[in-house]
Structures are given as C-alpha cells and as structure tokens.
Amino acid sequence: MLERLGINAKEAEKTLMVASSEKKNQALKKIAEGLIENTDKIIEANKVDLENGEKNGMAKSMLDRLKLDKERIEGMAKGVLDVATLPEPVGRILSATERPNGLRIEKVSTPIGVIAVIFEARPNVTSDAAALCLKSGNTVILRGGKEAINSNKTIAKVMRQAVKEAGMPEDVIQLVEDTSRESANELMKMNEYVDVLIPRGGAGLIQAVVKNATVPVIETGVGNCHIYIDKNADLKKAVDIVFNAKTSRPSVCNAAESLLIHKDIAKEALVAIKNKLDEKDVTLVGDSKAREIIPDMEKATDADWATEYLDYKMSVKIVDSVEEAIDHIYKYSTGHSECIVTENAGTAEKFMNQVDSAAVYLNASTRFTDGGEFGFGAEIGISTQKLHARGPIGLPELQSFKYKIYGDGQIR
C-alpha cells in the first residue's frame, strides 16, 4: 500500500513541480472552501476520535490538541488561504553570476519533491502540511496517529476532492490510513520515493524517526521552553507573559515549561506570578530558594528541569545572574523557544545573542513561535536543528535549489 502511495506521489510530482502559481492558489482556495462547507462532517468524525480518546484515558491536554470545532476549522481554512496569498517560492533566482568563459549560472529555488509527514493527535496538521507542500510544489504523504484517524480521513478526502476540482492530480495529497507502527517504520525507509520526512509530535515520535529513518529527516522539536525574569523586568509584563505562555494552551510545543527568576526580584515576582497561575491551577515545582518563598511548592528534581510537561505544570529556579540563567538554558533547553523579560537593553542583547535556540524573545510570550504568527501562513512543525531549516517550517524551508547554466557552445 505504501509503495503505491509512493508511486502515486512521484507521478503527481511531475505535474505539481511545474504548476503555475495561479493553479496552485486555485487549489488552495478550493481546499479552504471545502473545509468550511464540510465543517459538520469533520466535526462528526472528530467526535468519534474524541470519544475513543476519552475511552482510552487520553489526557485532557491531548484531547485539547485533538479537538476540532467550528472556530478551529475556520482557523484551518484561514491558514490555507493565508498560504495562497504568500509569494510564489518556486523558480526564484537566488543568485546569478557570469563566468569569464561566458557561462551564465543561476541558482534557482525548486521543490524538494515528495515530503512525508508523520504526526500525532493534531488533525489541523493535515491541512497545514498539505497547503504548504502544495504551494511549494511538493507532493505530500501524510501519516497521522490512530487518535485522529477519523478526522484525518475526512479532512484528506475533502482536500483531495478540492484539488481534483481545481484540475490537478488528487494524489498531490495522500493519507496513510494504516496507523500501525509497521506503516510508520516502512514510511521511514522509503528512500526510493520519499525525499524528506518531517516528524511532528512528542519526544518519543521524533526520536523514533531520527533513530530509525533511512530517508533524510528534518528534526522538529520538543519544546522545553524557558522564561527568564530579569532583575530589571517590568513585573506586570512578566506576570502576563508567563501566564499566557504557560496556560493559553499548555499542550503545545511553544508553551513555557521552565521559569527562571533573578534573586533580586524573586520574592515579589514569584508571588505575583503564582497568584496569577493559581487561576488555572498550575502546579509549580522549584529549587530550594523558590521553596523558601513559596513553602508549599513541591521540590523540583533534576528530571523536572529537562521535562516538557505539556500540562499545567512548571518548574521554577531562582538564579543569581543572567549568566546563570543562560547556563541553565544551555544545559536543559531543547533549542525551541526562550524568553527574557527585562527593561535593560544590554542584558536583553546579551541573552538574545548567547541563547542558542530557534526563537529567542524579548518581552513577549513564547506562544508566538508559530508559522502563522510569523507570517508564514502555516507550518509543518518547528525545526530545532541547524541544517537547512530552523524554527517554523514554512515555504522557503520546503525548497531545494538547482543550478541552471546557460552557454553558447563552451567546452572545457
């Protein structure tokens, strides 16, 4: 079955890689329309997944990731339309030179080819990934988790029909309906058909792909994100930023997991932040200095500093300096997103220059690490690697390049 999907994807690639921007945008608009028109069907399928998740004891934070409603489907459709409005990424001349022998050499952006995406209980990834791949001239093979299979099947059917109505091969978008571990393992080794594989999910999924795949992988990131409250922080900003970064949607990778506070502002800041976090019943675990301020706080273990909770829980450490905060982040960060809250420009610059993560913030919530928020229309994931793609994976990251060499009979 997977080999058939691979053959179909390679065949559809021939059409998509040379499709005009107008044609691709038409298909994207049809997809957006299809998602809105089929909202009730998608919600109905999603309810089945939610019921199954509840029966299987899925955590509330994961059920939130899985859930689709009218507003979220409208958001999915908007994301697709946003991608349609972005500049055409294919065929851009990245550089051009002329050699002494008269050869003119152009470096031109081109689609990667066939992109496979393995993801978990996030059905919105189905449309985000498909839209970005289509606009960037890549065919896509989607393999979601069993938790969202009914939602994904319905969304994929809508998108394939929309693409067909736009006059393009429906196989530019394909879904692996077999959610067994075997199908994932086989997809990881389809070197003959898959040009790059992008995993999107928890640490277990990402590491399984990185360790087992023989096809090239863009490693997306687990998000152990930190917020450092400097001694020169605006306390109101600090409270609002931590509350938003931790509680607006704790189940996502850009949610803050660790809080670092300078000792000079620790008592005032930690009490104010805890009072706000109590509104959402956030559990705090801390070091000895934090527990002196909040005596009933649980003790943080070494494992806590490295944990992506994806829940209403946060670790707290009191530090003596910005240097100590940076060292702590270096030791425990997953390289996703970090934030400093300060009004001191020099301290801010030091933090932003020395912290080596994909996104580094000054006085803003880590929740903005998102393709849509960055103006990329959507994203397939957040890359925490340093080769080729880093941060939200948008259209430019889904491009390769080739050299076009124009001559007039030159020989060597």
Image (cartoon, helix red, strand yellow):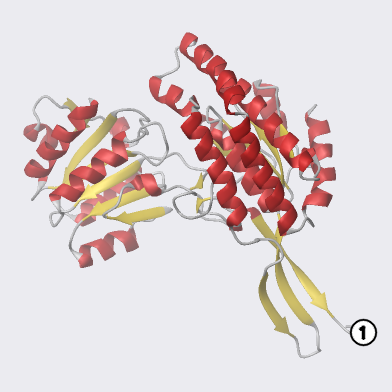
Count of numbered tags: 1
Where residue 111 appears, as percent x and y from the top left, is 71, 55
Q: Nearer the viewer, residue 154 or 189?
A: 154
| Number of residues whose C-alpha sits closer than 10 Å to that of mark 1, classed few (under 14), some (14–19) or many (20 or more) | few
Where residue 306 appears, as percent x and y from the top left, is 34, 36
Where residue 184 appears, as percent x and y from the top left, is 66, 28
On screen, residue 403 above or below 232:
below
Q: Quadrant of the N terminus?
A: top right
- The residue sitting at 33% across, 36% down in the picture is 248
Q: Quadrant of the C terminus?
A: bottom right
Is residue 126 visible to the viewer in this orientation of the structure?
yes
Is residue 202 visible to the viewer in this orientation of the structure?
no
> Residue under circle 1?
409
Q: Give the left or right position of residue 393, taking residue 61 as reference.
A: right
- Quadrant housing residue 285: top left
Q: Amino acid at mark 1?
A: Gly
